[in-house]
Image: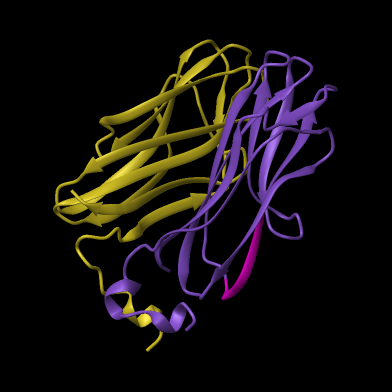
Chain colours: A yellow, B purple
Amino acid sequence: MGITSKKANKPWNTAWGVVAETVTTTDVTFTTSETDIVSVTFTAVTGRNYLVEAKAEVYSTALSDSANFKITDGSNTKLERTYSTSVLANTAQDLQVRLHEVIAAGSATRKLRGVRTVGTGTWHAGNNEIAFIRVTDIGPA
Amino acid sequence: MAVATNLVPSEAGSSWGMVAYVQSVGNISFTTETTILTLSYVSPGNRRYCIRTKAEIYSSAANNVITMKITDNSNTKLERAPIPMKVANTAYDCQMVYYETPSAGTITRKLRGVRTTGAGTCNAGDGEIAFIAVYDMGPA
């Protein structure tokens, strides 16, 4: 029996690993309107701990602008956020956000969203490099 | 007995934890692309892996940009993180994460750095822990 054929066996007291992800290499722009950067939908199981991780390269066209980057649910409700300040205009910098949560059973959507909070520049997220949002089962809750 | 044939069904559906780790507590200077750390691990195939890296980085000149990369053994970029160095000679934390499903065999991954903006001398490590860690994340 090959390893792949054993995929359905998931002992409850272990981590089950990656359950869903979206990886893109596109570039999304935004200013003061909160905008989706990347999203993922998966089926959550009751009583499990999940790690939601998102990453993108971001930059603003203007120096010293700031933006909030949020992990939200499918209704755009903020679950976690971080921020980025434009250290150098038009110069990409790495951005990562992580969230640990226990999610009600059923279909769940998680998004990485961005909105400019300070300044006048246009923010870019993605920069045509890898951007992702990934959901990992990290064990029983 | 090889890892792949030592499995029982209950193990194949879960994560197997850390499979490889390397760390250093030193400092490497660079301007052109340079290897900071290297490790290899063995994949039995059909498994998902998470590679995490960390290093403190800084440049001798303000407003430089250092781009750190996770590469394969041929130095082909798999993931990257550009970090602007606003302040000279001041360490910034750089962490990266990369997921992959490699073919069975020995897999080599490197943490590499390159100055992509500016004229300063760049450094990685800063005398603090720098590492590459590889985790088995479960079946592919």
Nearer-the-camera pick, A18 or A34: A18
- Image location (x, y in percent) of residue B82: 65, 33
Q: Is residue A128 left or right of residue B48?
A: right
- Image location (x, y in percent) of residue A65: 55, 13
Q: Is residue A114 among what the camera can see?
A: yes
* Residue depicted at 47% across the width and 46% down the height: A132
Q: Which residues are magenta?
A: B103-109
Classify residue A45 by image quadrant: bottom left
- Image location (x, y in percent) of residue B87: 68, 13
Nearer-the-camera pick, B71 or B123: B123
Count of marks placed on residues: 0
Q: Is residue B47 left or right of residue B127?
A: left
Q: Is residue B64 left or right of residue A29?
A: right
Q: Is residue A90 among what the camera can see?
A: no
Classify residue B112 by image quadrant: top right
The verdict on residue A72 being magenta is no
Classify residue A110 by image quadrant: top left
Main secondary structure found in the magenta portion = strand
Which quadrant is home to the N terminus of chain A?
bottom left
Nearer-the-camera pick, A52 or A91: A52
- Image location (x, y in percent) of residue A104: 14, 47
* Residue depicted at 32% across the width and 79% down the height: A6
* Residue depicted at 82% across the width and 25% down the height: B121
